[in-house]
Amino acid sequence: MEQAKRIADGVWGVETVVGVGLGVHLPLRMTVLRVDGGLWLVSPIAIDDALADELSALGEVHALVAPNLLHHAHVEAAKRRYPEARLLGAPGLAEKRPALPWDGAVDTGSLAGDLQGRRIEGADKLSEVVLWHVPSATLVVTDAVFNIPEARGMSWLVLEYLSKALGHVEQSRLLRRLTGDRAATAKSVAAILEWPMQRVVMAHGDVVTEQAAAELSAGLWWWQGIERRPPIGATGSADQMVRA
């Protein structure tokens, strides 16, 4: 069965499930981007021979990207499979995983001709860098927001009541513990929303293809310093809305 599903021109997703403890399971996606003729694997998952063959048919793997301080479990194995690929991590990850042969960091700015990055400042314990794939107008996020429509058992309990991130594009409340400066996160979100995105691809949940920027803005309300989740498409800055 085909594992790499086409999302847009030059964008594919490989979906699996990850256990995070206490019987909680989350959908997980590795995003594959065609960048300057090669493939970048964002949030690498376990790659077996069958998946490696699929990826080989798409192109040569040029880079492996761990886009925040939480998504790095499989980068070592991925590097062994693709020893010639560049290994890039979020700022601070090289200090967290010093034994890995890092080639550099993904950060704010141009990463390649077809790819730009934006680090979310003010949440240093997460240190997430979102990626902007220019040719497809696709934004790739990792843990900044989820879009999980439904869950069962303990997964439902945690997502619905603890993280409050079930049923629509939403940020887990657990990220508040990783955030130290909401004024800084608000500036980062404002910069991200300037990109003319047609879709948002996240590590956890369904791809957003309708009103992508509006959905993302609503989901990132807390990082924008807003007291409650605004309606989709609400206009005005956080300063014009009720602030926490």
Image (cartoon, rainbow, N blue to C red):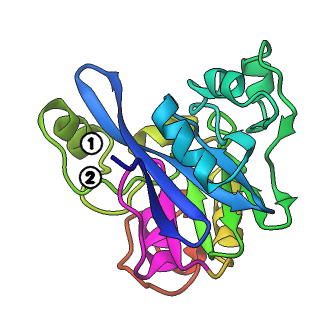
Q: Which residue is pictured at 77% across the width and 30% down the height? A: 92
Is 193 magenta? The answer is: no
The crowd level at tag 1 (other Cα within 10 Å; few <14, some 14-19, many 20+) is: many
Outermost residue toward the left in this view: 153
Q: Which residues are magenta?
A: 197-220
- In this view, 122 is above or below 155: below
Element type where label 2 sits in the image: loop
The answer to whether any part of residue 220 appears in the image is: no
Asked if the residues shown at circle 1 and circle 2 are in contact, with their CB atoms under 8 angstroms apart, the answer is yes
Disc 1 to disc 2, how far (Cα)? 5 Å
Which disc is residue 159 wearing?
A: 1
The x and y percentages for residue 59 are: 68, 53
Q: Name the amino acid, label 1.
A: Leu
Q: Foreground: 154 or 136?
A: 136
User: Residue 16 got which mark?
Assistant: none
Residue highlighted by disc 2: 166
The answer to whether 231 is drawn above or below residue 181 in the figure is: below
Query: Which one is nearer the viewer's eye here, 26 or 14?
Result: 14
Dot 2, crowdedness within 10 Å: few (<14), some or many (≥20)?
many
Q: Residue at x 64, y 28 (%)?
A: 78
